[in-house]
Image: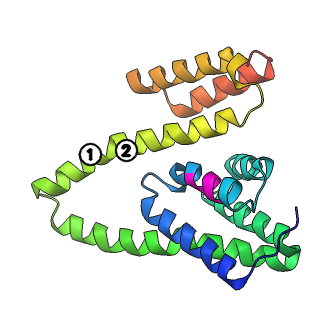
Amino acid sequence: MSLSLTVADWLTLLTHFAALSLLAVGGAITTVPDMHRFLVTDQHWLSDTQFTSSIALAQAAPGPNVLFVALMGWNVGLNAGGYRFAALGMALAMMGILVPSTLLTNSSSRWSHRNRELRAVRAFKQGMAPLVIALLMSTGYLLCVAHDDWRSDWRLWLLTALTAVLVWRTRIHLLWLLGAGAVLGALGWV
């Protein structure tokens, strides 16, 4: 894929990720559906394979899960002109996703800590939980339908539902569930 990006395109990348940064309640991963719409569907700066591979690689690597944004910016830069633009794409995407939310979080957490007893502050915190869950579910759905044969993978759906119930209803540590999933995958059951 070869692109020709102008300065305005690079600024569009920065400002779009900056806007998503302010919507990333629950982490940057919750904004994946809109990133897909923007980068793959609207702008055609990434292929669907590059997009899902960026997320998969970053999630498998140790470190913060926001690294997928750096990979997306890197891939946009690679598509726009090779390695000389890859670092620019990565820097713009990461600045866009990190700077606005960091400034907002810093100022709002200081304010909410000072006013933690206010009814509105407590209600806001309780009301955000369903929103975060819905955003994470939409991200999971988007990554699922990108898989070629997602409807026939009933065992994966069953494992996902069982894991969700176990997390919700028991105190089993998540590492045990991850280990069980790894064993099931190694045995070829899922």
- Residue 121 sits in quarter: bottom left
- Going 71% across and 71% down the picture, which residue do you hit? 90
Residue 83 in view: yes
- Choose between 85 and 160: the one closer to the eye: 85
Report the amino acid beneath label 1.
Gly
Q: Main secondary structure of the magenta part?
A: helix
Query: Left or right: where does residue 126 sit relative to residue 88?
Result: left
> 10 Å neighbourhood of mark 1: few (<14), some, or many (≥20)?
few
Report the amino acid beneath label 2.
Leu
- Choose between 57 and 13: the one closer to the eye: 13
Q: Which mark is residue 80?
A: none
Q: Are marks 2 and 1 in contact (CB under 8 Å)?
A: yes
- Choose between 182 and 1: the one closer to the eye: 1
- Going 58% across and 26% down the picture, which residue do you hit? 177
* Residue 144 image position (x, y, % from top left): 66, 33
Query: Left or right: where does residue 82 sit relative to residue 183?
Result: right
Q: CA distance from mark 2 to mark 1?
A: 7 Å
- Residue identified by numbered label 2: 131
* Residue 104 image position (x, y, % from top left): 37, 71
- Going 43% across and 65% down the picture, which residue do you hit? 22
- Choose between 78 and 103: the one closer to the eye: 78
Secondary-structure class at tag 2: helix
- Residue 150 sits in quarter: top right
- Residue identified by numbered label 1: 127
Q: Is residue 181 above or below residue 39?
A: above
> 10 Å neighbourhood of mark 2: few (<14), some, or many (≥20)?
some
Q: The N terminus appears in which quarter of the rendering?
A: bottom right
Q: Which residues are magenta?
A: 34-38
Residue 65 in view: no
Q: Residue furthest front?
A: 42
